[in-house]
Image: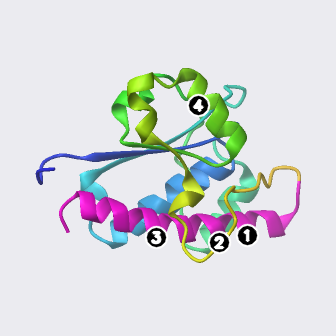
Amino acid sequence: MTGSQQIGVLFVCLGNICRSPTAEGVFRGLADAAGLLERLRIDSAGVMDYHAGSPPDRRAQEHAARRGYDLSALRARRAVADDFDRFDFVLAMDRENHRDLLRICPPSRRDRLHLFLDFARDTTVREVPDPYYGGADGFEQVLDLVENASRGLLEVVRERLGG
């Protein structure tokens, strides 16, 4: 990749109001701190559209803000087949989201679809649990997992960008 090219990263969960906007906000923050934000295109989406246009869940925003991540400007949208052309990494939060994304993924773009936690270090957890129906601990667990995987993903992205 040349210095003028961007890498696109799309985070996807069920409704795009808890896990994927949290991942977008965390990854955006880490990329900014690493000086890579301008070389990335970062977004999030849901496999369902029932929250389209809505901001992230209030609890997700509050827990993220405590760690310095601002999710307030984000708005939910549904993932579409064209996302696989626009993003180099389409990252599902869990296996069910991954299966749903496979249904819309063009066969030639399947190499772009991954479970997000495949980028996490030192954990055997493979799925980011949905905190929506739980308590505060769930949102904190999501942040822990997302920060871990975001750091691993940032290493891969940095290598693709040439250092």
In x, y percent, where is residue 52?
63, 28
Q: Is residue 42 magenta?
A: no
Q: Is residue 78 visible?
A: no
In the rendered structure, which disc, 3 or 4, sits on the residue that comes first in sequence? Answer: 4
Q: Which mark is residue 140?
A: 1
Residue 53 lies in what quarter of the image? top right
149 relative position to 86: left or right = right
Q: CA distance from mark 4 to mark 2?
A: 24 Å
Mark 2: amino acid: Asp
Depth check, front residue: 141 or 35: 141
Q: Which mark is residue 34?
A: none
Mark 3 is surrounded, within 10 Å at the Cα level, by few (under 14), some (14 to 19) or many (20 or more) other residues, namely: some
Q: Which residue is mark 3?
A: 151
Mark 4: amino acid: Leu
Mark 1: amino acid: Glu
Residue for point 42% across, 40% down? 112
Residue range in magenta is: 134-163
Residues at marks 2 and 1 touching, judged by CB atoms closer than 8 Å: yes
Mark 1 is surrounded, within 10 Å at the Cα level, by few (under 14), some (14 to 19) or many (20 or more) other residues, namely: some
Mark 4 is surrounded, within 10 Å at the Cα level, by few (under 14), some (14 to 19) or many (20 or more) other residues, namely: many
